[in-house]
Image (spheres, rainbow, N blue to C red):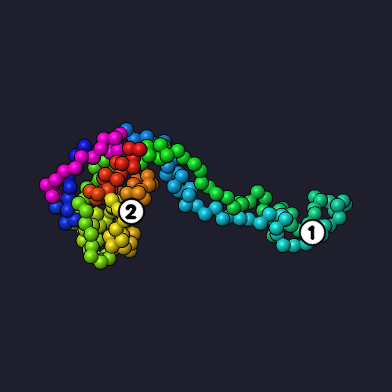
């Protein structure tokens, strides 16, 4: 499929680029997308939750009443989980939520995400640009020119560009990443995907391995 190339003022440059059908034109695999997004979100979890169990609660281990003759259930220490202030039964313990996915499945998920955005016509190809110094106002002007100032957008650079990245860092709705930092979650979480020309070759090379 072909896509026209815009400049950072939002005007058509008159040039077109060919987007690989093997990356931007496949039939999306929804289950692969689900697994990759699930792994991404799982990796964001710290897993440091912890509740004190019976052996960890502060308190005496003295038997609080005699075993028989009270007319109520027998009871041991005040740490009994049935009592207020006692330990927690089967409470959360520190753990890792991460799990493994094959590289081929993750590539398929990213291809599916790109294809979904392409079918929705939410991909913009932009010629490479740079700022002399980090300047949020300049980046906002680019968003306005592309009519993205009120939409969640993801800018994909061919390589790390510190000035462009720093210019966008204060904007909650916009995110800037390099081609090698792309994730399925980031692609789908944005309303519009802005691909700089230099990123296309890197993306297609990474996903054709």
**SS for callout 1:** loop
Quadrant of residue 8 within the rendered picture: bottom left
Q: Residue at x 70, y 59 (%)?
A: 57
Q: Quadrant of the N terminus?
A: top left
Work out whether residue 89 can be spotted.
yes
**Distance between the Cα atoms at labels 2 and 1?**
56 Å
Residue occupied by mark 2: 177
User: Is residue 17 magenta-colored?
Assistant: yes
Residue occupied by mark 1: 61
Instruction: State whether residue 27 is above or below residue 132.
Output: above
**SS for callout 2:** strand
Q: Is the residue marked by circle 1 packed among few (<14), some (14-19), or many (20+) residues within 10 Å?
A: few
User: Is residue 154 magenta-colored?
Assistant: no
Q: Quadrant of the C terminus?
A: top left
Question: Which mark is on residue 112?
Answer: none
Q: Residue furthest right?
A: 69
Left or right: 9 in relation to 34: left
Left or right: 172 in relation to 36: left
Quadrant of residue 163 within the rendered picture: bottom left
Sequence-first tag of 2 and 1: 1
Q: Residue at x 23, y 40 (%)?
A: 19
Q: Position of residue 91 (x, y in %)?
A: 63, 51
Instruction: State whether residue 172 is above or below residue 96.
Output: below
Q: Position of residue 206 (x, y in %)?
A: 34, 42
**Magenta segment, which residues?**
12-26
Q: Nearer the viewer, residue 24 or 117?
A: 24
Q: Position of residue 61 (x, y in %)?
A: 79, 59
Instruction: State whether residue 169 is above or below residue 206.
Output: below
Instruction: State whether residue 136 is above or below residue 90.
Output: below
């Amino acid at each position: 499929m072909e896509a026209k190339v815009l400049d950072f003022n939002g005007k058509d440059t008159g040039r077109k680029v060919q987007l690989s059908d093997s990356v931007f034109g496949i039939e999306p695999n929804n289950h692969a997308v689900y697994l990759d997004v699930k792994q991404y979100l799982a990796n964001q979890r710290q897993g440091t939750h912890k509740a004190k169990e019976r052996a960890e609660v502060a308190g005496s281990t003295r038997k609080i009443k005699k075993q028989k003759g009270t007319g109520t259930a027998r009871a041991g220490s005040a740490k009994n989980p049935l009592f207020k202030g006692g330990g927690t039964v089967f409470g959360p313990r520190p753990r890792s939520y991460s799990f493994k996915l094959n590289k081929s499945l993750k590539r398929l998920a990213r291809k599916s995400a790109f294809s979904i955005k392409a079918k929705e016509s939410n991909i913009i190809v932009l010629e490479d640009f740079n700022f002399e110094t980090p300047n949020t106002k300049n980046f906002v002007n680019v968003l306005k020119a592309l009519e993205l100032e009120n939409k969640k957008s993801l800018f994909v650079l061919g390589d790390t560009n510190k000035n462009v990245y720093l210019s966008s860092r204060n904007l909650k709705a916009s995110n800037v990443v390099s081609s090698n930092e792309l994730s399925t979650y980031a692609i789908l979480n944005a309303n519009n995907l802005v691909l700089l020309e230099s990123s296309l070759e890197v993306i297609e090379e990474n996903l054709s391995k």
